[in-house]
Amino acid sequence: MLTKNIPAFLVLAASMTLVACGSGDDATPSSAAAEAATEAANDAADTVAEDAQDVVEDAADAATDAIDDAADAVADAADDAADAMADAADDMKDTMADAEETVSDMVDDAAATVAGDSDAPAASGDCALTIEAGDRLGYNTDSLTAAASCSEVTVTLVHTGKLPKNAMGHNWVLVKKSDLDAVGAAGMTAGIDNSYVPVGDDRIIAATQLIGGGETSSTTVDMSVLDADTEYAFICTFPGHWSIMRGSFTIG
């Protein structure tokens, strides 16, 4: 900004030089030169002042724009954060409501199982039995009876729920009642790839695959290996299920 004013200063300097050169022992000061020098000096001063004013105004405008932009950015960020927090709160509320409903159902099912209260009657003696389990901890019956006349019995497990097997999977495992707790505990460490059924465990008489919502699996019980004087039981060996999901298997 100041560079363009250098000629004004040069004019001023030249004018002053002329005044100086015009004064001497024999020279008379030139009033015209003095006036010209004064006018040039005033013009230069006015130009410098105007340029300085322009610089100040430009800087003020730039600062105002920057402040406005920053204020807008902060306001937008605050709005976005408020929206995100509101969405997160709604999601958490829905999740907690679903969890509360699931826990309530599980508690009800567990209480019914412990009390021996089943929604379905015990299956009558047959060579083909069906048992159901859904998205809750519990079979639809706590007893199955196979006809003594059967050489083998097919047991079909139906998962009536919607959850996948890694979340709420079920199986049906037949054991001696005396082995129930031990096999249930062993199943927890067998892994999902083995349907939580211990591989090569002689205590397991029959077992279905682990299934999820909408799936079925069947297993065959060789009745010749069962003893009418022995108590048998069935369990689900999915981790955490066997202590609740259990029932009696009898020969009728």
Image: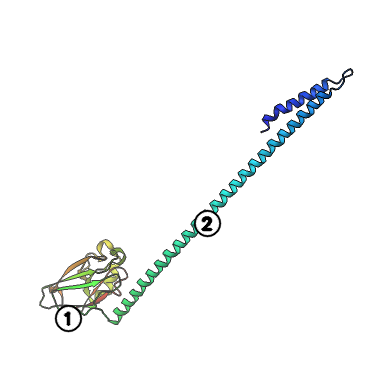
Q: Is mark 1 on a helix, strand or loop?
A: loop
The quadrant of the picture occupied by the N terminus is top right
The residue under the point 33% across, 74% down is 105
The residue under the point 30% across, 67% down is 168
Q: Mark 2: which amino acid?
A: Ala
For marks 1 and 2, the one nearer the N-term is 2
Pick whichever, 22 or 154, lies toward us.
22
> Marks 1 and 2: CB-CB under 8 Å?
no
Residue 102 badge: none
- On screen, residue 56 versus residue 167, left or right, reads right
Percent position (x, y) of residue 190? 28, 64
Percent position (x, y) of residue 7? 70, 26
Pick whichever, 133 or 224, lies toward us.
133
- The crowding category of the residue bearing disc 1, from other C-alpha atoms within 10 Å (few below 14, some 14 to 19, many at least 20), is few
User: Can you tell which of label 1 and label 2 is closer to the viewer?
Assistant: 2
Q: Mark 1: which amino acid?
A: Asp
Question: What residue did someone put label 2 on?
Answer: 78
In the displayed structure, 112 sits above or below 90; it is below
Pick whichever, 144 or 228, lies toward us.
144
- On screen, residue 249 versus residue 241, left or right, reads left
- On screen, residue 138 versus residue 222, left or right, reads right
- The crowding category of the residue bearing disc 2, from other C-alpha atoms within 10 Å (few below 14, some 14 to 19, many at least 20), is few
The quadrant of the picture occupied by the C terminus is bottom left
Question: What residue did someone put label 1 on?
Answer: 229
Q: What element carries label 2?
A: helix
Q: How many numbered discs sit on the rendered protein?
A: 2
Pick whichever, 59 or 81, lies toward us.
59
The residue under the point 76% across, 25% down is 13
Residue that protrudes farthest toward the front in the picture: 32
Percent position (x, y) of residue 158? 22, 69
